[in-house]
Image (cartoon, rainbow, N blue to C red):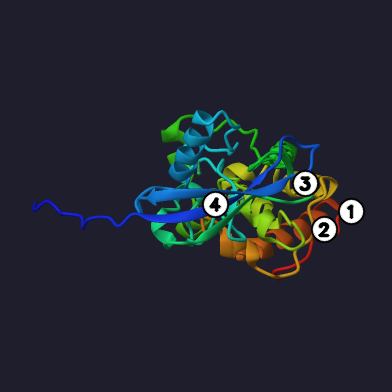
Amino acid sequence: MVAEHSPSKKLFNVTLRVWRQPDAKSPGKFVDYPAKDVNPDMSFLELLDVVNDNLTRQGEEPIAFAHDCREGICGTCSCTINGKPHGPGKGIATCQTYMRSFKDGDLILVEPFRAKAFVVQKDLMTDRSAFDQIQQAGGFISVRTGAAPDANSIPVPKEDADLAMDAAQCIGCGACVAACKNASAMLFVAAKVSQFALLPQGQPERERRVLAMVAKMDELGFGNCTNQYECSAVCPKLISHDFIARLNREYIRAVVKTKFTPFSSAAGGAG
Ligand code: SF4
Ligand code: FES
């Protein structure tokens, strides 16, 4: 195999305009940080690391931002870059955004994810434990699934398995909420509910799950879906808004099946 020679990289300069907020109770403001000699192959988070190194050397408070895997897996990184959750790329998380997406002289606006149910803790860090509460309300199964060979002994139609795997891609990042003018969590809940509803292992709690997760979503202050589809447009895992229609069907099915009085205004949007 012939080794590839990468062309010499042209370094460039940008200015980061970053939201700084000392804690959840204090007001925040934007502060400019010029960044010189930026390598286009740096990731956006690596640039934040460099800026933070410089701030630390100068005795200033580094910019607080959340990250973990830096591979688009964990859903921890959560910046809004130039007004778009996770930045300019499609189907990628903030940590997978590279500086080659920007050009020399750019002013780059960096903010935390904002929503009523997501409280800014510090700078770019947002408390998204509301998602954990929704998951705890019903995003689990209680059947004994055994080991891998046991799972393989339960036949699942390929179409259902593929759809369940699509839904299971959700990394719980919260970009869908941050992008939605209603701060709706419908795409997140739709992915979690659909993942289990499509598989045999998810059937025992199928009705209880969707009713409980939608109720918790409402209780925590997330809005309704009004078919804007901003959620799926920014989702780093390209979760389709078709799952919201599936969530609505699951909800109605559960209401009918349990003769339950609807208590949620959230059954709306996407069909
Ligand atoms: S649906 Fe997409 S945007 Fe929303 S939490 Fe899951 S991965 Fe993130
Ligand atoms: S740091 Fe894990 S998805 Fe970005």
Which residue is under mark 3? 117
Disc number lying in front (3 or 1): 3
Circles 1 and 4: CB atoms closer than 8 Å: no
**Sequence-wise first label, 4 or 2:** 4
Circles 3 and 1: CB atoms closer than 8 Å: no
Which residue is under mark 2? 256
Q: Marks 2 and 1, Cα distance to the nearest angstrom? A: 13 Å
Disc 1 residue type (three-letter): Phe
Disc 3 residue type (three-letter): Ala
Disc 2 residue type (three-letter): Val
| Residue 259 visible in image | yes
**Sequence-wise first label, 1 or 4:** 4
Mark 2 crowdedness (10 Å alpha carbons): few <14, some 14-19, many ≥20? few
Q: Quadrant of residue 186?
A: bottom right
Mark 1 crowdedness (10 Å alpha carbons): few <14, some 14-19, many ≥20? few
**Which of the pair 54/109 is nearer the observer?**
54
Q: Residue furthest front?
A: 58
Q: Marks 4 and 2, Cα distance to the nearest angstrom? A: 52 Å
**Residue 16 tag number:** 4
Disc 4 residue type (three-letter): Leu
Disc number lying in front (1 or 4): 4
